[in-house]
Image (cartoon, helix red, strand yellow):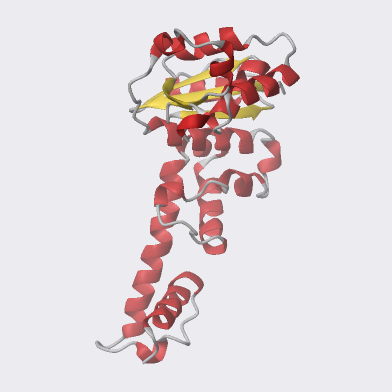
Amino acid sequence: MPALAELQRRVRNAIVASEDDAVRPLLIGGRDPAARLAIHRRHYHASLIETLRTRFPATAWLAGDAPVLDAARDYVALRPPSVFCMAEYGEDFPAFLSTRPGMARLPYLRAFGELEWRVGQVSVAVDAPPLGRAWLAGLGSEALMVLSIRLQPGLAYLPIAWPVDELMRVYLSDEAPTRFDMIPARAHLEVRGARGDVQLARLAGGDWVFRRALQAGQTVEEAASQALDMDPKFDPGRALVALSDAGLVMARRSLEEE
């Protein structure tokens, strides 16, 4: 009998990659143990395909159910999970789907799918009590610049080259417009979600860079420097007040507290 780790590896390969030879001698009991293994394999594939279908309903609405289902079958076969949480499975599915035959007619499909992935992530977040504007009181400019700020968990920042945010609003509103033109247009998007509610907002370039840098753990000074590189007219003070007034600041931390 092989060691547990080796046995697990063989069973995994039999389920995921249909490599039955190494595990078949170990299957015992019943009239057809290989058939029982096949049931587990079918359940594995079906579960992952269903995970993708439920994760990307808007993408299926845009591209069509059949093409998305076909792509999901191949994706599951080619890219088994590398994470323990199924909620994290499929992040690169939009990129995979966009390379499929016939998808060139939708050059914005990948961007739309990636936006849907972010919407799904932030929508399940739970806001922490915000600090509001009060945390800024009494802070001198030097003390302020060395602070790092923790933002609410349900935030995502992504650049877009198509108006996929407007298309997502159409999907979420369940109201089909008489006409919708997809014209390339670059923008900086903030996706905010909490307890199932999602808001999409376009930000000025400096504000977007500033908030994304803060989210990544950089100090106010570092984030402001990057924002000023993007937009020399960027105002860090105004941006901090706007961020606080929006309820997006949940904690602050100075370098001395680390």
Q: Position of residue 157 (x, y in %)?
A: 57, 28
Along the horizontal axis of the image, is 191 left or right of 164? left
Name which residue lies at 51% across and 39% down: 60
Name which residue lies at 56% across and 20% down: 166
Q: Quadrant of residue 173?
A: top left
Relative depth, front residue between 211 and 91: 211
Relative depth, front residue between 199 and 157: 157
Seen from this angle, which residue lies furthest front? 256
Relative depth, front residue between 42 and 150: 150
Of the 4 image quadrants, the one containing the N terminus is bottom left
Name which residue lies at 41% across and 88% down: 24
Seen from this angle, which residue lies furthest left? 30
Query: Does 24 appear above or below 58?
Result: below
Q: Position of residue 82 (x, y in %)?
A: 50, 59
Q: How many marks?
A: 0
Residue 61 showing in the rendered view: no
Query: Does 239 appear above or below 79?
Result: above
Name which residue lies at 40% across and 12% down: 132
Q: Quadrant of residue 231?
A: top right
Q: Position of residue 248 (x, y in %)?
A: 44, 19
Residue 204 showing in the rendered view: yes
Q: Quadrant of residue 210?
A: top right
Query: Does 249 appear above or below 215?
Result: above
Relative depth, front residue between 49 and 9: 9
